Image (spheres, grey):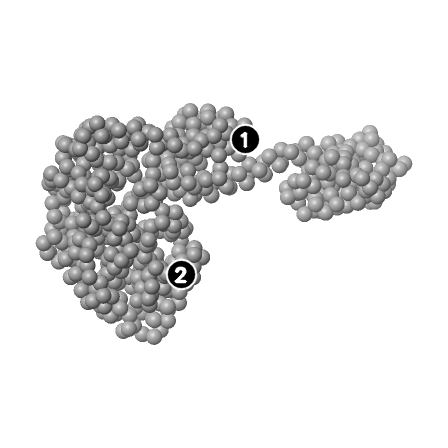
């Protein structure tokens, strides 16, 4: 038996996902036909009769004979849920619609959606939304292919420019995209369907292309298996029923009184009390009442009522079997699966809300050592385990779609442990890479903290305020960074050395002075008038080892310091050719 394909719509915020799903629901509800689109639990079912009615001429044009029972759209609440929606490395969605605003193009969240679709190997089409916003666009027909020829040449030119800008954006991600009606081989090109979720233009074409692609390329995947599998979309408290779960069954079938096994650190095993679906919708705004059914078959949205669901988590996978013994075996297998994530003695601590999310997180951090990967919020134990890492780059707890307890946050602050948390998975990888850069810089800065910095300064004429004990002179910094405590040497006489005791600028003590600054410097061990006079130039008296360390970390030095460092090297090597080597 072939089931209906599961379709998920992913988009950047405000690119029109809700409007698109609302339009699809409204279209069939308004048609008032038997078996019209029903708004199931977190899903929208589009039966075959509706597809035929909306897309009849298009089905003929593209030579599509419908074999599937319809399309099932899943309304994914967010990226965290979408990442969790996977089965053995692939998405439970059979096909996806990537919604892009034609006026804005590819945005950050669109990029994240593309990365997820690529990782889960989910086939998709692009719905290029908001064509009605193009200046001068006229909506005369719900079919884009009928409406486009009637647009003015100026409007067509604007559309084509915007369209191919998006094609260019998609090519950066390795996709060769084209307008759906200009494609001869859909295995070689990514189809783009221009639409307006607001007016409905292009939606018949979108449903047609989804139907055609699903039938042509996904037949094997759409064969219903024996085992019942599903995904939790939402956990809800319902008066009179207690904690319930809104789910999508994507394989097999289930009956009332079967056993439900939900994946997690401690899998939940419970007996199904009721399977509920909404009454068919007459008005999308009407308050919905649920009716019980004895059996549910894939693919379908259903509310499940059972004891012990209060610890269930949205995004978790589940299986449904007929006996308690089989349920316990599956629960043990799920525990083993969680333990199979390869861990090391030193490594990152990874936390996620679901197994799907955790596996996605492990995949994202492939290449970095992982000490522990668990489901649940970030706790003090996670901070303690992260602190035990000897490698500073690994003292990090990464949380995907989870929270950190207050005492964990405080402990992390006290012990300088980094917590990275987000409900957008790719931000976590970016955040960790940014942390590594900052940590690398911090470690380098620690390495050169006590080292004399390269500097060069000149005693200004008429600015000798005291000749000795200590000498106080007005100076101009010619290069580098002058700091209090630095040892200095006269540029043309290595026998005249001293130490900077203090630096003052406009009567106030300062720790350092940079190139171009005029400051007063007090010098220990130097007497002005004997071997030192106005106009003399001094450099910092770097050791050979200090030079090597500064050269190693020269990316932390200013351009002026780098130039002065090389000047000092030349002066020193004129006397000792092995200095700094």
Q: Is residue 69 above or below residue 404?
A: below
Q: Quadrant of residue 329?
A: top left
Residue at point 86%, 35% (across, down) = 495
Q: Nearer the viewer, residue 367 or 156?
A: 367
Let me know if residue 480 appears in the view. yes
Residue 287 horizontal/vertical position (percent): 14, 44
Residue at label 2? 176
Residue at point 33%, 65% (across, down) = 183
Q: Residues within 10 Å of mark 2 (few under 14, many from 20)?
A: some
Residue 254 horizontal/vertical position (percent): 17, 38
Q: Residue furthest left?
A: 34
Residue at label 1? 391
Q: Gap between marks 2 and 1, in whole Å?
A: 43 Å
Mark toward the viewer: 2 or 1:
2
Residue 424 horizontal/vertical position (percent): 38, 43
Q: Nearer the viewer, residue 537 or 276?
A: 276
Side of 173 where 318 appears, left or right: left
Residue at point 40%, 61% (across, down) = 176
Q: Quadrant of the C terminus?
A: top right
Q: Please tell me the numbered disc located at residue 489.
A: none
Q: Residue furthest bottom?
A: 153
Q: Quadrant of residue 402?
A: top left
Side of 196 where 405 appears, left or right: right
Q: Quadrant of residue 479?
A: top right
Q: Secondary structure at mark 2?
A: loop
Q: Earlier in the sequence, mark 2 or mark 1?
A: 2
Q: Residues within 10 Å of mark 1 (few under 14, many from 20)?
A: few
Residue 285 horizontal/vertical position (percent): 16, 49
Let me know if residue 462 appears in the view. no
Q: Is residue 561 above or below residue 214?
A: above
């Amino acid at each position: 038996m072939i089931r209906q394909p599961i379709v998920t719509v992913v988009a950047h915020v405000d690119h029109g996902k809700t409007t698109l799903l609302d339009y699809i629901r409204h279209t069939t509800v308004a048609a008032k036909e038997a078996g019209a689109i029903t708004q199931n639990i977190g899903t929208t079912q589009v039966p075959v009769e509706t597809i035929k009615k909306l897309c009849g001429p298009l089905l003929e044009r593209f030579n599509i004979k419908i074999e599937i029972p319809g399309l099932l759209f899943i309304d994914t609440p967010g990226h965290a849920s979408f990442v969790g929606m996977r089965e053995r490395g692939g998405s439970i969605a059979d096909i996806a619609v990537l919604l892009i605003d034609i006026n804005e193009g590819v945005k950050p969240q669109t990029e994240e959606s593309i990365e997820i679709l690529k990782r889960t190997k989910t086939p998709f089409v692009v719905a290029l939304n908001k064509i009605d916003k193009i200046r001068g666009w006229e909506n005369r027909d719900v079919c884009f292919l009928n409406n486009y020829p009637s647009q003015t040449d100026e409007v067509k030119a604007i559309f084509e420019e915007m369209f191919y800008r998006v094609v260019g954006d998609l090519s950066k991600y390795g996709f060769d995209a084209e307008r759906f009606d200009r494609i001869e081989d859909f295995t070689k090109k990514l189809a783009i369907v221009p639409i307006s979720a607001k007016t409905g233009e292009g939606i018949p074409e979108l449903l047609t292309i989804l139907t055609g692609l699903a039938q042509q390329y996904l037949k094997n995947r759409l064969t219903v298996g024996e085992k019942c599998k599903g995904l939790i979309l939402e956990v809800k408290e319902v008066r009179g029923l207690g904690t319930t779960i809104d789910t999508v069954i994507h394989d097999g079938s289930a009956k009332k009184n079967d056993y439900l096994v939900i994946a997690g650190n401690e899998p939940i095993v419970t007996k199904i009390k009721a399977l509920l679906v909404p009454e068919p919708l007459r008005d999308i705004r009407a308050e919905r009442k649920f009716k019980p059914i004895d059996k549910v078959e894939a693919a379908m949205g259903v509310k499940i009522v059972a004891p012990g669901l209060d610890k269930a988590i949205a995004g978790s996978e589940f299986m449904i079997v007929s006996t308690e013994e089989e349920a316990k075996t599956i629960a043990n297998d799920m525990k083993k699966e969680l333990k199979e994530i390869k861990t090391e003695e030193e490594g990152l601590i990874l936390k996620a809300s679901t197994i799907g999310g955790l596996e996605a997180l492990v995949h994202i951090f492939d290449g970095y050592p992982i000490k522990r990967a668990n489901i649940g919020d970030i706790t003090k134990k996670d901070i303690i385990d992260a602190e035990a890492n000897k490698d500073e780059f690994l003292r990090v707890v990464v949380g995907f779609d989870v929270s950190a307890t207050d005492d964990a946050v405080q402990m992390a602050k006290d012990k300088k442990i980094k917590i990275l948390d987000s409900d957008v998975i790719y931000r976590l990888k970016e955040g960790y890479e940014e942390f590594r850069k900052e940590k690398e810089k911090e470690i380098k800065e620690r390495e050169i903290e006590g080292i004399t910095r390269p500097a060069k300064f000149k005693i200004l004429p008429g600015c000798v305020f005291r000749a000795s004990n200590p000498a106080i002179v007005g100076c101009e910094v010619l290069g580098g960074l002058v700091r209090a405590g630095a040892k200095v040497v006269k540029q043309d006489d290595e026998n005249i050395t001293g130490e900077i005791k203090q630096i003052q600028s406009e009567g106030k003590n300062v720790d350092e002075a940079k190139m171009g600054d005029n400051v007063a410097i007090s010098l220990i061990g130097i007497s002005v008038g004997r071997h030192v006079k106005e106009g003399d130039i001094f450099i910092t008296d770097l050791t050979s080892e200090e030079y090597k360390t500064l050269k190693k970390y020269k990316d932390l030095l200013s351009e002026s310091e780098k130039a002065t460092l090389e000047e000092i090297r030349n002066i020193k090597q004129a006397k000792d050719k092995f200095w700094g080597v």
